[in-house]
Amino acid sequence: MCKYEDDQRTKLSPVNFLDFQLCRLASPVYDLSYFLLCCLPEEDVQNFDDIIKVYYKRFTSFLRELGSDPNKIFPFEELMN
């Protein structure tokens, strides 16, 4: 079950695994919490507020691209509560 980049089968292609076990329709807070708790290095915890702001800025930008008003759908205050 490997994919090779060459015909001689000496170099493996990079692989990414995608696990849908936790896939559900829920608040984005669940995804953000899961990511931060699992992936954020301890030394970056001091930048938590900045990380949340960057996340929210990108998230709302994406909502606008979809034609939605982020302040109606998911205001920043709701994220923080």
Image (cartoon, rainbow, N blue to C red):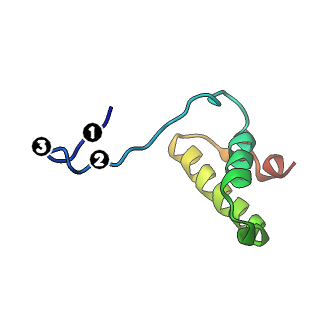
x then y, percent, for residue 4: 23, 43
- Give the mark, 3 or 2, whose residue is nearer the N terminus: 3
Judged from the image, the secondary structure of the residue bearing numbered disc 2 is: loop
Badge 2 crowding class, 10 Å Cα cut-off, few under 14, some 14 to 19, many 20 or more, is: few
Kindly report the distance in space between the C-alpha atoms of the residues bearing marks 1 and 2. Answer: 6 Å
Q: Residue at x 28, y 47 (%)?
A: 12
In the picture provided, is 9 more to the left or to the right than 50? left
Please, is residue 73 above or below residue 40 in the view? above
Q: How many marks?
A: 3
Q: Residue at x 20, y 47 (%)?
A: 5
| Mark 3 lies on residue | 7
- Amino acid type of disc 1? Lys
Kindly report the distance in space between the C-alpha atoms of the residues bearing marks 3 and 2. Answer: 12 Å
x then y, percent, for residue 36: 71, 54
- Amino acid type of disc 2? Ser
| Mark 2 lies on residue | 13
- Give the mark, 1 or 2, whose residue is nearer the N terminus: 1
| Mark 1 lies on residue | 3
Asked whether 43 or 8 is in front, the reply is 8
